[in-house]
Image (spheres, helix red, strand yellow):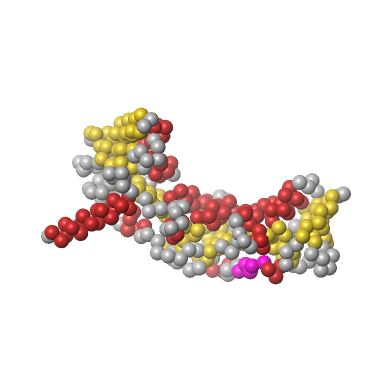
Amino acid sequence: MKITFDREYLQGKVNLIKGITKVRTLLPICQTLLFDLSGKTISATDLEISAVTGLVNYEGGGKKIVIPAGTLSEILGNLSNQEVTFTRDGSDNVLKIEQGRVEIGLALFDPKDFPEVKILNAEEAFTLTGNDILRGIGKVLYAVSSDETRYVLTGMLMQVKGGQFQVCGTDGFRMAVLKKDIGDIPDSPQIIIPGRNVKILKELIENNDTVGVIINNEKVQFMTPRVTVILRTLSGAYPDYENVLFNAENDNLIFIARVQFLDCLKRMAPIATKTDPVRLTRTFNSGLTVRIESDKGYAQETIDCEFKNETPFDMEFNLKFLLDAVEHIEIDQIVVSYPDRYGVVVIDSGDYRCGIMPLRSGRTPLEQAADEKKKDESEGDDE
């Protein structure tokens, strides 16, 4: 076997998918790349996420070789921008990499040990833009949980429903949802993609890509002109984001200029610690006072806004949660919806909504919600 590659082209292909091989694993084969020289592809997999990219710009032929991804990338990165030749003699388990007077021998793995990468039927795909997918990821990924004890929340929900591309992230304290109209496309299953896999997917898709998407109950596949990515999904019951953020009718509304609110929250940040809440209080008909106190001192500011009715508003929040939500909003005016009693506060900006649980008495939102439920049950028993 003897094949000649354009070095810059080959390095681009290797670097495109090598991120998948960086996961810590007890299986060395998952840190390699499979070159299928007959099928003209390069594949990478860590068993949870797989990627396949086409390999067409070379001369020669051959079968399958499996090469350590990181080592190959470093070797190519240190060669000059000229053609590079791969040579393997018979059954020899060493790949000879040559360029000019440079010769490097690289030990190969057995192709039979490389996990099978199954590509779904492309005819079943619907189409999204790369911008739609990346925007969806960017809007909700910050809210995905890192707590492995609540495993299902460590993933991002994705589905097509009612002609909309929908994504959601939550950690049980806050929730972010984006709904994007995409036309007359059949509903898909509701799937949950592990957060780490979402981050890798984000690196493989570009804004101007036309992306074919296939969603089934076990996998989701994304196909761009450069790469095909297959992701394993998580099993489990995901929170009902429709009920939390979209079903409640509420006239307790605050209309706030996004830039003014965001700048105010940023001015609070130097005073805050992780445990110090920021307090939002209605002070007059068109004023909202934002105040924070900590061991560092205090900060207070009143910003202009508009309230739809006379319902009082006085709640405490995790400052970072508020900042994360407002920073991801694009429109000039946001609408804040709040309950008469304790409950989720919703920030609405059209196709994007965030829900944040307020703090109370130094207790976590989940503890507070449990207390509220017990209170309601107690009141029902009294009746």
Q: Is residue 166 left or right of residue 82?
A: left
Quadrant containing the N terminus is bottom right
The part of the image, by quadrant, that contains residue 312 is top left
Q: In this view, does 282 lie to the left or right of 72?
A: left
Front-most of 334 and 4?
A: 4
Residue at x 49%, y 49% (from the top left corner)? 138
Task: Look at the magenta stretch and give its main secondary structure.
Answer: loop
Q: In this view, does 112 lie above or below 282?
A: below
Residue at x 44%, y 54% (from the top left corner)? 147
Front-most of 328 and 95?
A: 95
The part of the image, by quadrant, that contains residue 296 is top left
Q: Does the magenta stretch include residue 117?
A: yes
Q: Is residue 161 magenta?
A: no
Residue 49 visible to the viewer = yes
Q: In this view, does 344 lie to the left or right of 69?
A: left
Residue 14 in percent (x, y) is at 69, 54
Q: Give the range drawn in magenta.
A: 114-118
Residue positioned most to the right: 101
Quadrant containing the C terminus is bottom left
Residue 344 in percent (x, y) is at 31, 50
Residue at x 80%, y 61% (from the top left corner)? 94
Residue 248 visible to the viewer = no
Residue 263 in percent (x, y) is at 40, 33
Residue at x 31%, y 44% (from the top left corner)? 362
Residue 153 in percent (x, y) is at 43, 57
